[in-house]
Image (cartoon, rainbow, N blue to C red):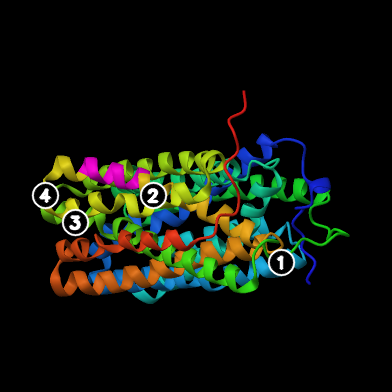
Amino acid sequence: MNVSSEALPLSAKPKGTVFPVLISASVCHMLNDMLQALLPAVYPILQGDFNLSFAQIGLLTFVYQLTASIFQPFIGLYTDRRPMPYSLPLAMVSSMSGLLTLAFATNYETLLAGAVLLGLGSSIFHPETSRIARLSSGGAHGLAQSLFQVGGNFGSALGPLAAAFIVLPRGQHGLVWFAIAAVAGIILLTGLAHWYQSNGHAVRPANKAPARHPTLTRGQVSRAMAILLALLFSKWVYLALFTNYYTFFLIERFQLSTKNAQILQFVFFAAVAGGTIAGGPIGDRLGRKVVIWVSILGVLPFTLILPHVGLTATVLLSVVIGLLMSSAFPAIVVYGQELMPGRVGMVSGLFFGFIFGVGGIGAALLGWVADWKGLWFAFLICSFLPAIGILTAFLPNLHEPKPKMS
């Protein structure tokens, strides 16, 4: 059995949630994901400047998210065994380099190179900061994941607003202004790396964490992980549709301006942030499976209705869908970490990497579908994806929900 760097044994856990560290990790997640979200948020600008087709936009997303996805599980597995706390500021340096490359790109190939650098930064960032969130949780793992992930959701929500109010008036070169946010992230991540190392978390502990849940066989764990990946597939292909094509859908279907469409994109992302905040603590109290049931399968009626309604109903449904669907991810991540407690970095890297990869492939395929049949048809076929949530019935029950504390 491999030795894990994750301090899971009770003797190594902090006595309480270390909120300054957890909040700092969440702020860094916000800055990182805001930089990442600028890429799809400026697609309307890049489409005009470079005369891109929807298929080219989809390929740009595919290259970015494939880079972000392919390395994450391997980075997580490596740092489970050999912690690298100071890789965190390096991740932000890579993201900043990608952003600057996009700002000064003069052809499509350079745009692809900028997307690769952005993706590389994300692939380094997520496994280690997710581990820091768990280390600072004090045992409230769902709460910690929610707070950590809501930073990323809020950053993703800021992307369209930033594009609308900062990049859109200045054009492609307006992306340069966000190097300031990247520098702030580098400073904060350096501080987190120091906490990580100075508190002994960057040293392999003497005791070994189990590679899988003690009550489950290897086969049961593998099946449960496969189900979780299927659930993530349904969730993140649908979210890839909203992330990359919702503004175009609003512009095409309701004749909105680019600025107004980006503001409504922010409304959706804000709802996603709200659902993420709720999902972790509810999972701590009621159980992860309850949250997964409601957030995946429970959203199906709303996704089925959305392609057939007017603008006001579309906005309202997008809020409901964002709230419900986003609440699943903290529960899924913590559930996966409980399935494999000795592989926290690998599980985090696998899940974050998988969603980036699925999102990239989904964006590329949906771009092709949009060019072929139109955006309305893409929204129609994706509306059935939450039906995959029925697989939640086959997940094992790991823990009973904890009673409410007075």
Please identify the dominant SS of the magenta region. Answer: helix
Left or right: 206 as drawn, with respect to 314: right
Could you tell me residue 33's position as x and y percent? 48, 52
User: Which of the two discs, 1 and 4, labels the residue nearer the N terminus?
Assistant: 1
Residue wearing tag 3: 249
Identified by mark 1, the residue type is Ala
Measured in 3D between alpha carbons, the distance from the residue under mark 2 to the one under mark 3, in whole angstroms, is 24 Å
Could you tell me residue 305's position as x and y percent? 17, 51
Residue 177 appears in the rendering: no
Residue wearing tag 2: 295
Q: In the rendered image, which quarter is residue 240 located in? A: bottom left
Q: Is residue 6 above or below residue 279?
A: below
Left or right: 255 as drawn, with respect to 278: left
Identified by mark 2, the residue type is Ser
Q: Are marks 4 and 2 in contact (CB under 8 Å)?
A: no
Q: Residue 211 got which mark?
A: 1
**Residue sitting at x 47%, y 43%:** 279
Could you tell me residue 124's position as x and y percent? 61, 63
Question: Tag 2: Cα neighbours inside 10 Å, few (<14), some, or many (≥20)?
Answer: many
Q: Secondary structure at mark 3?
A: helix
Could you tell me residue 227's position as x and y percent? 47, 66
**Quadrant in which the C terminus is drawn:** top right
Q: Secondary structure at mark 1?
A: loop
User: Which of the two discs, 2 and 3, labels the residue nearer the N terminus?
Assistant: 3
Q: In the rendered image, which quarter is residue 311 located in? A: top left
